[in-house]
Image (cartoon, rainbow, N blue to C red):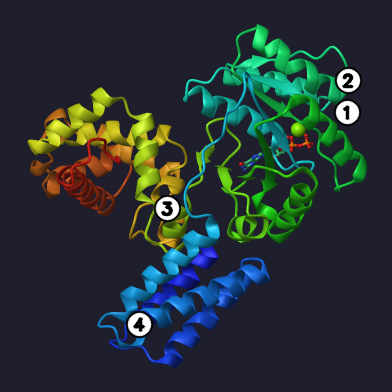
Amino acid sequence: MFGNIQNSFSKIFRKWRSKGKLTEEDLDRGLLEIKNALLEADVNYDVVKEFIEGVKESAEGEEILYALNPGQMIVKIVFDELVKILGKAKKEIYFKGNPAVIMLLGLQGSGKTTTAGKLARFLTKKNRKTMLVPADTRRPGAVEQLKQIAEQAGVGFYKPDTDNPVEIARKAPKVAYIEGYDTVIIDTQGRLHVDDKLMQELKKMIKVAKPSEKLFVADGMTGQDAVKIAETFNNNLDITGVILTKMDGDARGGAALSIFSVTKKPIKLIGVGEKLSDIEQFYPDRIASRILGMGDVLTLIEKAEETFKAEEAKRVEQKIRKAKFNLEDFLAQIKQIKNMGPLGNLAKMIPGMPAKSVENIDDKVLVRIEAIINSMTREERLYPEILNGSRRKRIARGSGTSVQEINQLMKQFDMMKKMMKSYIKGGRRGLPF
Ligand SMILES: Nc1nc2c(ncn2[C@@H]2O[C@H](COP(=O)(O)OP(=O)(O)OP(=O)(O)O)[C@@H](O)[C@H]2O)c(=O)[nH]1
Ligand SMILES: [Mg+2]
């Protein structure tokens, strides 16, 4: 996501930073390029205007043209302004009542039902006990779809005894209370277009279910359309927040960058894939740094920490401290990374890695790395220093690869070792790899 905006920003920043001093003309030219990049990414026009004006104002306030290092200052100003339009601070899901009721709203196919399962699983990690409620009784198969998702997610499911969505919304929280659930997620029906009948029905459901969250589920791929529809839902139903789905695709970022400024309702979570685990908290500052190409180290570390068992991380950490990290550990780490999802997603979050260079990395590369390490003797894996030319030739033959590939792998291994060391020095307990 944000690939194109990212590229434009990095080009503009490079130009700005290459100058010792910025003239007013340099600044204006850069801002014009930023404006075009944002519009191209389908960001709402008013939001773009507000953003550019905000940057200009701060640049003038900070007297950046006279500053010692204007290139760096402007990055910071743009970053702050991006965070502002993305919603400033992260906003957690809000729970009130027993059970707390969360309603998911949105158009057909925006991802409501999938998100219901992801959200339930996400909340399980926060010790909430969730029941999923199917209030989409019109689309054939919709109830069954949610039932299967509930099973997969290992959460409760409400079996409706009527096909009236308002009745379901009325009854389900009561049943959930009796059965000991503290959270209810109501999956609602989507329509192709916003229509009055849908709005009236949703209003009735809200009246009886009294949700503490009315979350609008928006398809992140649809750019400004999503923003317009969010506005309509907000005007009618006073939504409490937004979940943006399909942010793993080539969503240009328009929806993410506009929806808060237009509706004044925060994006709370983002969907980043079809699997139940593909949901993330939305952090405006992290997204801003991702857009500006600073890399999203924090999300990366959080992901890694989730997947890693603390014990394993500690063991590896001790090894690195003693500089004994070897290729067997490396292989184990790579397998862990594989469990964390597509490698490209993770690599994109590493600072300094240009988005292009990782787009082509796929899991096949991992298979080759495994093949190479498996062709080594145990001694070689434990003491990689002994890998001389003839050993490398033998390993290449054995693994069906080339000496160049082995050299490259050893370079990566050394880099990883160095990176891990610097993370430990920085006082991080968990490791990104
Ligand atoms: N890649 C990707 N696909 C997603 C994401 N969220 C949902 N989808 C896919 O989008 C499609 C529609 O998802 P649903 O959850 O059925 O959408 P819905 O809003 O419930 O649709 P209706 O019930 O017909 O209104 C499915 O194929 C999902 O797998 C996401 O974050 N990333
Ligand atoms: Mg659905």
Residue 387 disc label = none
Q: How many other residues sit within 10 Å of disc 3, few (<14), some (14-19) or many (≥20)? A: many
Q: What residue did someone put label 3 on?
A: 348
Where 188 sits versus 33, above or below?
above
Image position, residue 119 (x, y; %): 59, 30
Residue type, numbered disc 2: Asp
Q: Nearer the viewer, mark 1 or mark 4?
A: 4
- The residue where tag 1 is placed is 138
Mark 4 or mark 2, whichever is nearer to me: 4
Give the class, few, some or many, for how many residues have Cα within 10 Å of label 4's Cα (few <14, many ≥20).
Answer: many
Q: Position of residue 1 (x, y in %)?
A: 54, 55
Quarter holding ligand 1: top right
Q: Looking at the image, is mark 1 or mark 4 earlier in the sequence?
A: 4
Mark number, residue 163 = 2
Tell me the CA gap for discs 4 and 2.
Answer: 63 Å
Q: Nearer the viewer, residue 5 or 375?
A: 5
Residue highlighted by disc 4: 64
Give the image location of residue 230, x and y in percent: 73, 51
Contact between labelled residues 3 and 1, with CB atoms less than 8 Å apart: no
Query: In the rendered image, which quarter is residue 95 located in?
Result: top right
Q: Nearer the viewer, mark 1 or mark 2?
A: 2
Left or right: 176 in relation to 319: right
Instruction: Return the disc, 1 or 2, that comes first in the chain's sequence.
Output: 1
SS at badge 4: helix
Closer to the observer: label 1 or label 3?
1
Hey, what amino acid is under mark 1? Arg
How many angstroms separate mark 3 from mark 2 (CA)?
Answer: 45 Å
